[in-house]
Image: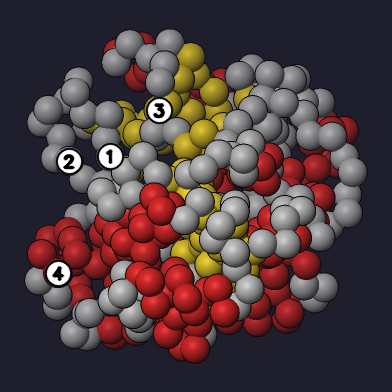
Amino acid sequence: MFDRKIYGLISSHIDHSEAIIITGPRRVGKTTTLKHFFEKIASSNKIFLDIEDPLNQSFFDKQNYGEIKQLLENKGLNFETKNYIFLDEIQFQKNLPSVIKYFYDHCNTKFLVTGSSSFYLKNLFSESLAGRKFLFEMFPLNFGEFLEFKGIKYKLPKITDKVNESTYLLFQPLYEEYIHYGGFPQVVLAKTTDDKNKALGDIFSAYFQKEILELSDFKKNSDVRNLILLLTQRVGQKLDIQRISSELGIARPTIHNFLEFLHGTYLIDLILPFGKFDSSIRKQSKVYFLDTGLLNFLGKKETGSIFENAVYLNLKIKEDVIRKIQYYQSDMQEIDFIIDDTAYEAKTFSSDSDLNSLQRYAKRISVENCFIYSYRYAKTKNTIYGFQTF
């Protein structure tokens, strides 16, 4: 059993009455997390149900909440006192938000539930459980968690630390493995290259089967597959929807729908331009994948593209807070990532000219701080590495 950083956040809300909802990609460890807290809660007045199982779905098919309550009582729950209901894969039962609301309001029930798709969960739960839920998003392992899963006890340098060459040489081989195969626990724990690639194949197959084939209502699923494969070749680039439409023979509105779905089901992220200083630039999103291992498995990318994607993921979450990331581009000027008052570039090898250019561009849009993520070791000031933590 490996602890995840998110466990501490969830633990701090266990004693609150609100439902805890854990969402995120498939195979990222949500079920393991749910079972962890099921065992951790001392009360015996609790039940765990996998909603992907049709027999368990039948508990909540009833229109009468009294019937649902009776079925759960038959399973051993006592609604006269505090009780806990753990539900895994709730996206398979669309009426669960109303059921959770009823039991929350009338039966002293604490819910802990998981689901694999924010595309469904956020839409289903946004209004019906307003004020009655805490939503947690769970992602593949970060580099620190990757080391823990591999049993490596090294203390990672912080982003503010100066990294010397010996420290770089200590962490870089591990970091290269991490960005090549990604952070899905199943992949990290696999012992051989073949096992890792097989696990990545299984993860994508499960995503395509469960999210696209079973939950979406797209008419041509092959079009979604073709778009995914095309996006692996567009990582870190602005998406020209007109060009993609022409290449794939898919209408632009349909592509927008596909992108929204892929974003909402945790396959990709889309970031918008830092546009208020450059209104002439069309509002085109840049695309990144939520796991570099899956990206590399699907597209066999060059190191530079995988590294830029890994930098994005490293910047995305700081102290378990998901941060807003933008990019800047005007004429020949470009900044990979902007967060608040800080600009970041991802380079295979950091140089003085790279830093000077970044500082010059950033100054024009009133961004004060500049850092360059370097894949190779460099002595340039303001150089940082992917294995450093915030």
Give the mark count. 4
Badge 1 or badge 2: first in the primary sequence: 1
Badge 4 or badge 1: first in the primary sequence: 4
Disc 4 crowd, CA 10 A, few/some/many (<14, 14-19, 20+)? some
Q: Can you give x and y, in whole percent of width and height, for residue 134 in the image?
A: 47, 44
Asked if labels 2 and 1 touch by Cβ distance under 8 angstroms, the answer is yes
Mark 1, residue position: 272
Helix, strand or loop at label 2? It is: loop
The quadrant of the image that shows the C terminus is: top right
The quadrant of the image that shows the N terminus is: bottom right
Mark 3–mark 4 Cα distance, whole angstroms, equals: 30 Å
Quadrant assignment, res 333: top left
Asked if labels 2 and 3 touch by Cβ distance under 8 angstroms, the answer is no
Tell me if residue 291 can be seen: no
Asked if labels 1 and 4 touch by Cβ distance under 8 angstroms, the answer is no
Mark 4, residue position: 254
Disc 1 crowd, CA 10 A, few/some/many (<14, 14-19, 20+)? some
Q: Tag 3: residue type?
A: Ile
- Residue at 49%, 88% in the rendered image: 55
Q: Can you give x and y, in whole percent of width and height, for residue 172 in the image?
A: 76, 45
Q: Can you give x and y, in whole percent of width and height, for residue 243 in the image?
A: 16, 63
Disc sitting over residue 283 in the figure: 2
- Residue at 31%, 31% in the rendered image: 328
